Amino acid sequence: MLTQAELVWLLAAVAKGDQAAFERLYDATRAKLYGVLLRILGKPEVADDVMQETYLKVWKMAGKFDPTIASPITWMVAIARNRAIDIVRQKGDASVEETPEAMNVAAETPPPLARREMTEELRRLLTCLGKLDPEKQRIVLLAYYSGWSREQLARKLDIPVNTIKTWLRRSLLEIRECMGR
């Protein structure tokens, strides 16, 4: 995988319409995005369609990417994840827990340096997540890792939707504060 600086440069080139840069960006990020999509959607054919939509959106919106707000891969995963969650919600109560084969997705192994950088950031995130109340940890993970909607959480956990919304918002604010952002 390319470094974050290289991905930023590629996105800037894509914003100017550079097709070669777009191909390099695709090659460098496709395994990660596909893994996220397949885990959320559970069906390769649906993940393929959303993957295509995601890269089309990246092509069109590359000029709006701001490296001071997010890393390139985070920005791209957010685009993919949001679209996948929209599809899951449109289909009703389908969720990752009902499609266990989606959990067996093998992502491309990042090079050692990228793995170390990811681990340091992940360690900080997990430390901050660990400071939350256990019930709120569970809700945050189900919502933002497994892609459950607030309505699904409310139904499954027998908690009012407005309470779920409030807990998620407060938990994210606590995590953001803990991470120093």
Image (tube, rainbow, N blue to C red):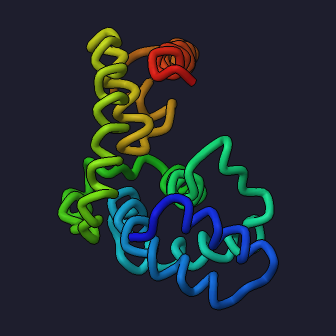
Left or right of 138? Residue 179 is right
Q: Is residue 52 above or below residue 148?
A: below
Q: Quadrant of residue 114?
A: bottom left
Residue 160 visible in rendering: yes
Left or right of 8? Residue 66 is right
Quadrant where the C terminus lies? top right
Left or right of 105? Residue 25 is right
Measured from the top left, where is residue 174 in percent x and y?
A: 49, 13
Q: Is residue 66 above or below residue 69?
A: below
Left or right of 163? Residue 142 is left
Quadrant where the N terminus lies? bottom left
Residue 82 visible in rendering: no
Measured from the top left, where is residue 5 in percent x and y?
A: 56, 60
Q: Nearer the viewer, residue 28 or 142?
A: 28
Measured from the top left, where is residue 62 in percent x and y?
A: 73, 66
Q: Nearer the viewer, residue 85 or 176?
A: 176
Q: Residue at x 36, y 20 (%)?
A: 128
Q: Quadrant of residue 137?
A: top left
